[in-house]
Amino acid sequence: MLHPTAPIGVLDSGIGGFSVVRQVQRLLPGEELIYFGDGAHIPYGNHSEETVVAMARYMFSFLEERGVKALLVACNTISCVLERCADAASCPVFSAVQAGAGAAARIEADKVGVISTVFTHNAQIYPRKILALSPRKKVVLSCGCPDLARLVEHSLGDPAGMALVEDNLRQELDPMVLEDGVDCCVLGCTHYPLVAGSIRKLYPGLLLIDPAEEMAQSLKACLDREGLNNPRGELGGLSIYTTGDVDEYALRARQVGLERVAGVEFYPPMELE
Ligand code: DGL
């Protein structure tokens, strides 16, 4: 039985899911949030499917044990294998890919670009879902970025690191934006909205689609529908857990502008063979 005062769980391989927490805190400030980032195993986008599924199930169990009333899979890579993990949750589960594809399908653009991890790109889940959901004909181009999530994870606020992020963005995005001329770009990895400012600076006028906004809207609609809004009438806190570096997560949470951080704690990572 789900309870309205229960927390909402958000998970990602790293700090990328902070882009989703940011939107949820804006839209649903009264909700209590628990975040789990698997800093020990990032980047997920370069792991095998079996490993991603095992690590995702580990994180689902962690959040289940804390009695969450909804679970936001703020990781596009895990969203690709959701049908293999969703049974580990007993509450509504929200997929970053479903949100991003839904938003991209609705906009009036003929040529849609998607940037994502290599795993998400290889799954071709975005092109398939966007084309299936779109009421009009579109061309969808997808590009897998092997290094971008890891660079973003460790570079926010560091000018030298951000210069590397911008070099990498140019290398990955120039062909799609300058040669293929996409009308918009889906940020198909939750780390990328954290550097949306850099992308806008490099490609002024390019419309960016951040699945985080749509995820927060879908969550709100679900809580409204199910009568699960937190009735306390107070601002909700955010508890962060990571299998990675606690101090780095605390710093990143401040840099991203997350509010009411109640604490950042270490949790042991799943052991990989
Ligand atoms: N933030 C994750 C995503 O949305 C993945 C980053 C990674 O671990 O490769 O796909």
Image: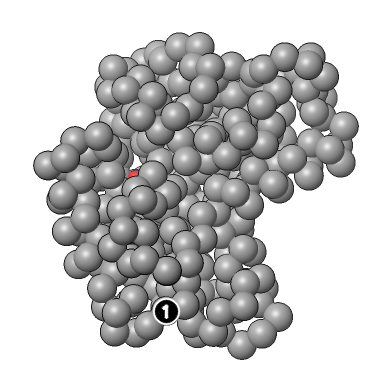
In the image, residue 10 above or below residue 148: above
Image coordinates for residue 216, horizontal then vertical, percent = 64, 43
Determine which quarter of the picture holds residue 206: bottom left
Drawn side of residue 84 relative to residue 265, left or right = right
The residue sitting at 30% across, 53% down in the picture is 198
At x 40% / y 33%, what residue is drawn? 256
Q: Quadrant of residue 10?
A: top right
Q: Nearer the viewer, residue 123 or 186?
A: 186
For this rendering, which residue is in front, 129 or 20?
A: 20
Question: Is ligand 1 within 8 Å of the beta carbon of the residue shown at mark 1?
Answer: no
- Element at badge 1? loop
Please name the residue that numbered disc 1 is placed on. Answer: 182
> What is the quadrant of the C terminus in the image?
top left
- Name the amino acid type tagged 1: Val
**Count of numbered labels shown in the rendering:** 1
Residue 169 x, y percent position in the rendering:
25, 60
- Quarter of the rendering containing residue 166: bottom left
Q: How is the image coloured?
A: one colour
Taking the view exactly as shown, the residue that stands out farthest to the left is: 160
Residue 190 seen in render:
yes
Residue occupying image coordinates x 30% and y 48%: 149
Q: Is residue 31 above or below residue 149?
A: above
Residue at horizontal 31%, vertical 58%?
A: 201
Q: Nearer the viewer, residue 170 or 52?
A: 170
- Measured as percent of width and height from the top left, residue 128 is found at 55, 74
Q: Position of residue 243 (x, y in %)?
A: 34, 24
The quarter of the rendered structure image containing the N terminus is top right
226 on left or right of 13: right
Image side of residue 93 versus residue 13, left or right: right
Residue 3, can we see it? no
